[in-house]
Image (cartoon, grey):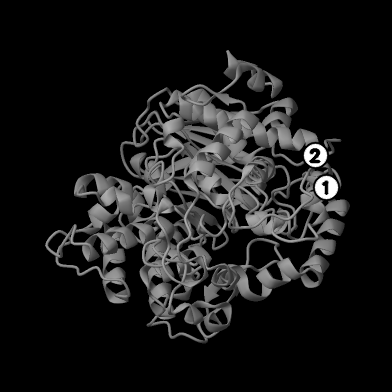
Amino acid sequence: MKGYAGQILHVDLTKGQCWVEKPEEGFYRSYLGGSCLGTYYVLKESPKGCDPLGPENVIVFSVGPVTGASLSGAARHAVTAKSPLTGSIGASEAGGYWAPELKKAGFDAVVIKGRASVPQYLWIHNGSYELRDASALWGKTTGDVQQMIREELNDKNIRVAQIGPSGENGCMYANIVNELAHFNGRGGLGAVMGSKNLRAIAVRGTVQAEFADAAGLMALAKRGAQQVLNEAGPAGFKQEGTNNCVNAHIGLGGLPTRNWSSGVFEGQDDLTPKAWESVIKPGTCFACVQSCKRHVDPKKVAPDVLDARYGGPEYETVGMCGSNLCISDKIAICKINEIAAKYAFDTISFGVTVGFLMECMEKGLITAEDTGGIELRFGDADGVIRLAELTGKGEGFGKEVALGSARLAKKIGKGSEKLLATVKNREFPAHMPQAKASLALAYALTPFGADHVTIEMDPAIGALPLSDQMRGFGFDRAEDPYELNLEKSKLFWRTQLMYSMMDSACMCLLAWGMWTIYTPDDFVDAVNMATGWKTNLYEMLMVGERRLQMMRAYNIREGLTNADDELPGKMFAPLKGGITDGFTVDKDMFYQAREFFYEMAGWTGENGAPTKARLLSLNLDWLAD
């Protein structure tokens, strides 16, 4: 086979044993890689009703067929398991440098179950593998652990995917991080690793992946480098990073503020990309010319103020730990981001949880006595920084914050659930459904909880002329971004297949999405160049749907129903201020659009189970039975 290492490593931590599976080519063509492959193993090998933090939960690290090519947006890996935050399937992708190294080390995936009796880390090197003692690493921050592993193995080029103390302590939204700044960041999969006493997976490989048409991939890479310079969308992300979303959301009146009570923040001008130039610099992932990440610049900020090893805040952090909390101090936002990276927890869930608590305190539902003496007020950056430290360490009131906002609402009571911004217990990212209407469906219906990177958003069909990519997916007229209608159900369903396809191949949406460097046809070409197959877009979209239908089936097996595909009441309450003053999600249309989506997806009955015919049409006979 080309494009694949052809080996999947299985690890049983309870028994301390490893073995290697060598699947046939047909398996790879059906499940491709990423979280499609990961969901297959989670469905097959974890029993119904397993405790997400128990030894029976299976966690899978996986890459894709193009991983390892020197091509923009091809350096991602997926982590898949049952999520402790949601109780549903959990899937999270990360960029960085770990994924290409795993492929060079000789593996396409690592499937892990059980629980080690003492802390361990997994060491994978050019086809060999071993479990090593991690007792000395336990309790250390991520920067220290990465250095300690590299020193112990005497190789500074080792790539380390690891949890932090928050994962050890069972934070419901603990992350997995590689290179200290690239995160598998949603759903608490870091807590799954922590529950298994697995602190890290260190990889090192020197065998380059073999591709069917390496020259073709190189030519595609060179063309992509020109596209970044010539196309407005990619050029904007290269010049400004993901924080260019601040400008976009200011224009839409959709910058989350005061715990989702408004789309307008009085300090928003201090959070624009131009303002961030005084603090951060561009960063990137393996072989990517997009350079959309941003890192703290040590030439602009003293090392005793911020530690540049831990990257810098992306838009989601700026939104959820900035405007949402009414904080415009960029150094403070960077410090929150740094703490989250050191202890490895999700800044989205943390920021939404703190915003929820701030509104609870504002409305008198909790007091400083409940929070260990911390006065949680909108705009109080020092209080948030203090709480971030406690959350990372699992100390004091930080233990409560680590539960996430939905679980806290159940403990607080007093109607506090009306202040939540969650679906399936998972906090909303920094994109407002009142300003991008299709996200009302995406947040409610995405299998792993509220997520913004599963579809192409409303601006893609917001004005004529529509792009060739959107026309190719059947859209030919402009739609109001603020309006929820049946066209938005189509937008969600069709482009969700595309984004699911990308997550199955571990390709970055910021390079391979509908408006970016490459087109869907380029995606197919890249897979064919990597593997030597003669696939087409239809087959690849089937892989995307296969992933989604397996995820839905997993959720049904675990007891989720249509009742879990629900928006929180806060989305139906009027926003305050600016051009979105008074805006809400249209409740009646939400339910109409949701039912229309169910019909398109082939989900029926009260639990929304995929029909047998739908599963059979995707060659998921084993699941249909």
In the picture of the structure, the residue carrying the numbered disc 1 is: 521
Q: Quadrant of residue 131?
A: top left
Q: Where is residue 200 drawn, in percent x and y?
A: 44, 49
**Residue 374 or 324: which is nearer the viewer?**
324
10 Å neighbourhood of mark 1: few (<14), some, or many (≥20)?
few
Q: Position of residue 544 (x, y in %)?
A: 67, 37
Q: Is residue 622 above or below residue 425?
A: above
Q: In terms of sequence position, does the residue under pointer 2 or pointer 1 come before the other?
A: 1
Amino acid type for the residue under numbered disc 1: Asp
- Residue occupying the far left of the picture: 369
| Mark 2 in CB contact with mark 1 (< 8 angstroms) | yes
Q: Is residue 144 visible?
A: no
Instruction: Rate crowding at label 2 as few (under 14), some (14 to 19) or many (20 or more) other CA atoms within 10 Å.
Output: some
Query: Considering only vertical position in the picture, is 170 above or below 263?
Result: above
Read off the residue under disc 2. 537
Quick check: 289 left or right of 128? right
